[in-house]
Image (cartoon, helix red, strand yellow):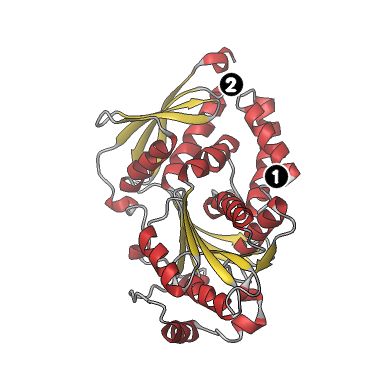
Amino acid sequence: MAGEKGKVLLAYSGGLDTSCILAWLIEEGYEVMAYIADVGQEEDFEAAREKALKVGASKVFVEDLKEEFVKELIFPAIQANAIYESVYLLGTSLARPVIARKQIEIAAREGCQFVSHGCTGKGNDQVRFELAYYALKPDIQVIAPWRLPVFFERFAGRKDLLAFAAEKGIPVFQTAAKPWSTDENLFHISYEAGILEDPNVTPPKDMWKLTVDPEDAPNTPERITITFDKGIPVKVINHNDGTEVTEPVALFTYLNTVARRNGIGRIDIVESRFIGVKSRGCYETPGGTILRNAHKDLEGLTLDGQMRALRDTNITAPYSKALYNGLYFSPECEFLNQSIAFSQRNVTGDVKVKLYKGNTVIEGRIARGDGAKL
């Protein structure tokens, strides 16, 4: 009987994997509710809702988390100059706390004994989600199908998932297969696996989604001014067309737009995962790259040198590692967040930035408030 084993809230994307997980959990005897988090990814959320209901979800929750993502994770990361292994701006890691927090909130409200996700057993995300789940609700039970032999032995590959989808009447929208996987949110997009597992393979030009090739960017520079208040971006003015933006989500979205057309924010790296393996990742972080560079420049004018050095070593580095490893809800991360806010008391002012063919060039800065006294 459906639901005899209890209620599960599944983090659902609408893709093949989580749709099959949803149907499999129902087959196993659970009542399954689907949870879809909008963190700024390009997705048809209504289509995903309808698909979850068609597969058998008893309820579907579509949650717009963009504002809290920007205000509570992205902007503090900019304040901290958060970066992992000197190059990765933590785009995937930053989204996980807001997604997990809302999932636990809904699970508690709906009386779910279980939460579930579609993360593989080889990646960092399983750790990030589950550490957040247990920090927020220690008695929650987690079902991670890709770590369960009963699941991964049955579904050894995409063909098995497609066959199961056909058996269960799960709609599968066939698209041209891409030889890599992606994860997208408002801050960035990642490309991993497939052909990218060979660290010497050059990514094809048509892989990059969020930015134009710097070689194809306009030949005319675009100039903007970013205003920071205590390290938080509060206004962007575009001097080419007069655009002015202040609302947090709109501001960040706009920076993504201007960075995209100027080819800013691409990296191709090999990183050390929390679980102990090396992983090649290609990332686009357009607006975040502009903000990081502008913020660091303003700190040079407004922060005491010794304080800045101390912050970089003892706050920024452990904070970045904590975010990467999924420890956002830990006591140490709470302490680091408070320390970061304290360090930003004087980081107020304007930074003039030229955007040109993949580059952010600082053309001037002015301190305001207490920062101007240094």
- Observer able to see residue 87: no
Residue 13, horizontal then vertical, whole percent: 47, 64
| Front residue of this view, candidates 30 and 223 | 30
Numbered disc 2: secondary structure: loop
- Observer able to see residue 309: yes
The quadrant the C terminus occupies is: top right
Residue 212, horizontal then vertical, whole percent: 32, 53
Residue indicated by mark 1:
318
Residue 297 tag number: none
Residue 346 tag number: 2
291 sits to left or right of 172: right
Q: Residue at x 70, y 60 (%)?
A: 140
Q: Residues within 10 Å of mark 1 (few under 14, many from 20)?
A: some
- The reply to whether the C-beta atoms of the residues labelled 2 and 1 are less than 8 Å apart is no
Residue 204, horizontal then vertical, whole percent: 37, 67
When the figure is inspected, residue 344 is found, relative to residue 72, above or below; the finding is: above
When the figure is inspected, residue 330 is found, relative to residue 279, above or below; the finding is: above
When the figure is inspected, residue 277 is found, relative to residue 258, above or below; the finding is: below
Q: How many numbered callouts?
A: 2
| Front residue of this view, candidates 115 and 308 | 115
Give amino acid for label 1.
Answer: Pro
Q: Residue at x 66, y 61 (%)?
A: 127
The quadrant the N terminus occupies is: bottom right
Q: Residue at x 64, y 57 (%)?
A: 128
Numbered disc 1: secondary structure: helix
Extreme residue toward the top, this view: 373
Residue 134, horizontal then vertical, whole percent: 71, 56
Give amino acid for label 2.
Answer: Asn
CA gap, disc 2 to disc 1?
A: 22 Å
Quadrant of residue 235 within the rendered picture: top left
